[in-house]
Image (cartoon, grey):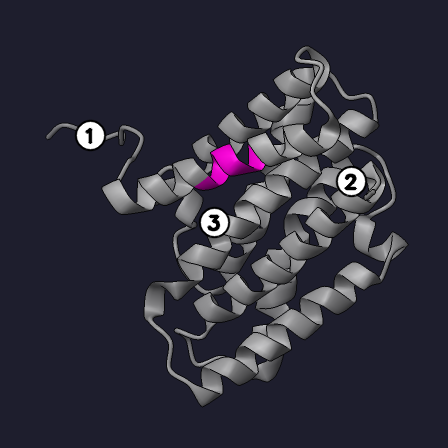
């Protein structure tokens, strides 16, 4: 039977790989060379978790375990090679980005809970882990960050993080099932937001 630690480790590695791929797919719309692609991939894959670990005063995850760094580099290079062989739709990065958002939200929330963080802090650590890498990716690609202008993004992350926290702390649900429920909610809301254009109200100055 898979242990909880192994499950969370796998989720975090998968999130890193998926977000690295999304970074390359987004950067592919710019005339970046291979080095530029790798930089964007690493920013997307490692940025959120790095900020989370600094805020929680713990050793940065990819410095403690270089498997994360290796997974990000390999996923970025593999995606770069694939894109050079076959043209892909410009918005294809949105799908792996949605999956990465779900995986990172779960891993970030669980990491904060393991540190004994209060429930609200733990949920926000999940959001930071989920969205900050994407913000770095978009800034490096000279884009307005998707989290600020697109369909529901951080909201989806926070909903899933709160569900995970609630099930873990008060619902008596095992960490694995809580992670599955929280991640599924993030992914469902994000994909529905993309399909049906769900957005938060926008501040507009009246003329």
Residue 28 falls in which quadrant of the image? bottom left
Which image quarter is the C terminus in? Answer: top left
- x 41%, y 41%: residue: 190
**C-alpha span from label 2 to label 3:** 24 Å
User: Could you tell me residue 93's position as x and y percent?
Assistant: 43, 62
Q: Is residue 14 above or below residue 90?
A: above
Residue 8 falls in which quadrant of the image? top right
Is 75 placed left or right of 192 in the picture? Answer: right
Q: Residue at label 3?
A: 98
Helix, strand or loop at label 2? It is: helix
- Nearest to the observer: residue 126 or residue 36: 126
Q: Nearer the viewer, mark 2 or mark 3?
A: 3
Q: Earlier in the sequence, mark 3 or mark 1?
A: 3
Is 34 placed left or right of 149 in the picture? Answer: right
Q: Residue at label 2?
A: 54
Q: Residue at label 1?
A: 205
Q: Any magenta on residue 97?
A: no
User: Could you tell me residue 89's position as x and y percent?
Assistant: 33, 71
Q: Are marks 3 and 1 in contact (CB under 8 Å)?
A: no
Decide if residue 31 is in sight here. yes
- Nearest to the observer: residue 41 or residue 176: 176
Q: Which residues are magenta?
A: 182-187
């Amino acid at each position: 039977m898979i242990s909880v630690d192994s499950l969370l480790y796998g989720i975090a590695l998968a999130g890193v790989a998926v977000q690295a791929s999304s970074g390359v797919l987004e950067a592919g719309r710019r005339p970046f060379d291979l080095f530029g692609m790798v930089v964007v991939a690493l920013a997307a894959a490692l940025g959120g978790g790095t900020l989370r670990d600094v805020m929680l005063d713990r050793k940065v995850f990819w410095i403690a375990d270089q498997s994360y760094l290796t997974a990000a580099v390999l996923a970025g290079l593999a995606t770069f090679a694939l894109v050079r062989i076959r043209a892909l739709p410009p918005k294809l990065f949105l799908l792996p980005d949605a999956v990465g958002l779900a995986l990172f939200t779960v891993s970030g929330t669980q990491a904060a809970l393991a540190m004994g963080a209060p429930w609200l802090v733990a949920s926000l650590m999940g959001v930071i882990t989920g969205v900050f890498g994407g913000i770095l990716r978009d800034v490096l690609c000279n884009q307005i960050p998707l989290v600020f202008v697109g369909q529901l993004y951080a909201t989806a992350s926070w909903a899933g993080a709160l569900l995970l926290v609630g099930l873990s702390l008060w619902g008596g649900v095992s960490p694995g099932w809580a992670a599955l429920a929280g991640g599924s909610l993030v992914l469902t809301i994000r994909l529905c937001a993309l399909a049906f254009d769900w957005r938060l109200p926008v501040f507009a100055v009246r003329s």
